[in-house]
Amino acid sequence: PLPRAAQILGSSVAVGATSMCQKAVMFLTGSVDPTFGLSEDYASVRSMSKTYDAVLFTYSLGSDADTLKVKKLACENRGVFYPVPDNADLGGIMSAYIKYFAYGQEMCSASFLSYTSATGGQTLLAGCMAAYDRTGPNPDLLGVTCMDTNLLTDVGQWNATAGWPFFVCTASDMTKQCRQVNLMECHRQKVRLAYSKESVCDMTADQRQYASVSASFVCPCTDPTCRDDPTFTDEKGYFCDTWVGDDCKAAAASWGYSDAGLKEVQEKCKRSCGLCDWSSGACPGNSSVECPMIPVAPECRACLGRTSGVDIEQNQMACPPGAPRNIAPTDLPPSDAAAPVLPQLGLLALMIATAAAA
């Protein structure tokens, strides 16, 4: 199933319609194929994880499950190993993967969701924001609060106004914007420990360095003042956040960027490229800083650069009619057709790979 997962990831990226900020493979098994275990088997999975920036979460089901191979797969691919006891709440355990991504990124702008009311059948539109506990050096996600815009105005009437297409486009920009996941082994070990001591990894020097972390241990952090230039588009028309999960230092040959163009990406997109400086030790300070104020953009990103996927109404992203200008590239760069991985906009892409018990 893991080679098939790689094929699905590759196809999803190539099509450009799938959310591609962070990618995760969830591998559940009661027993691993006995022929799996050669060094080249693990190397193949590591290559998939690196190529598609996919985190591997593994789950061994039941008290008799194979744990050694399943744990090694997770530990070698920046993931978390979950030993699942008999009769455990599998759904609850699997949903814990979101803690990994919540721990490594901070949401400072709203996300919007269009849905149909279960009672009246009318279309509702919710705006949601994450809430954090900032009493420690690293912000800790408390939860998400949402409010229906229908409490302020009738969406059915609103979408008939001239300004509705602009709102849809800008709300989609905010919702689809990628955020870099800033995690090192210290953070991953804390996430693993939060589930079980059995999940803590000890296969690499970095993992062994933090093998004894506690819940109160303070990990290093990145410079909070290190940010992307939100107005920058690279020489192919992509915004900074489309580089999340991609190697900003090795894209020239794959995607046809010039050396100068790639250097500009590294300078303008430090946060998305994962190039922000880390503290030399524990994150300094006794509390984390509040999110910066993010003004609503006066123009939709689909009018200014390349965007992919669909908007909050499930329509293809496009510059809305009546926009003051549309300078977005309309041509497909020639190198994109052959590129193994393209920078993409979107939210978390989740895949599940299963293996039947022998």
Image: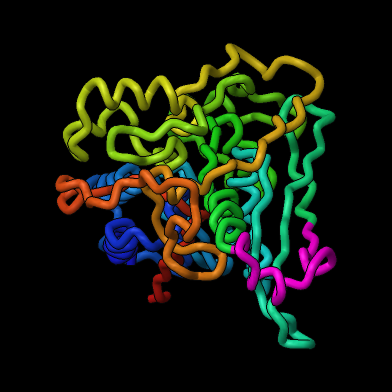
Res. 316 image quadrant: bottom left
- Part of the protein shown in magenta: 146-164
Residue nearer the viewer, 124 or 216 = 124
Q: Quadrant of the C terminus?
A: bottom left
- Vertical arrangement, residue 16 with respect to residue 230, above or below: below
Residue 305: x percent and y percent?
Answer: 39, 44
Write the residue at 48% across / 53% down: 346
Rendered view: 15 above or below 232: below
> Along the horizontal axis of the image, is 234 left or right of 66?
left
In the figure, residue 104 lies in which quadrant? Answer: top right
In-front residue for pair 39/237? 237
> For this rendering, which residue is in front, 319 or 104?
319
Q: Residue at x 63, y 69 (%)?
A: 90
| Residue, far bottom | 120
314 in magenta: no
Count the marks.
Answer: 0
Q: Is residue 246 above or below residue 357?
A: above
Residue at (80, 32) in percent of width and height = 134
Residue 200 in percent (x, y) is at: 58, 41
Q: Percent x, y for residue 132?
A: 78, 40
For the N terminus, the quadrant is bottom left
Task: In the displayed orientation, state which residue is furthest to the top.
Answer: 280
| 249 in relation to 44, above or below | above
Is residue 151 covered in magenta? Answer: yes
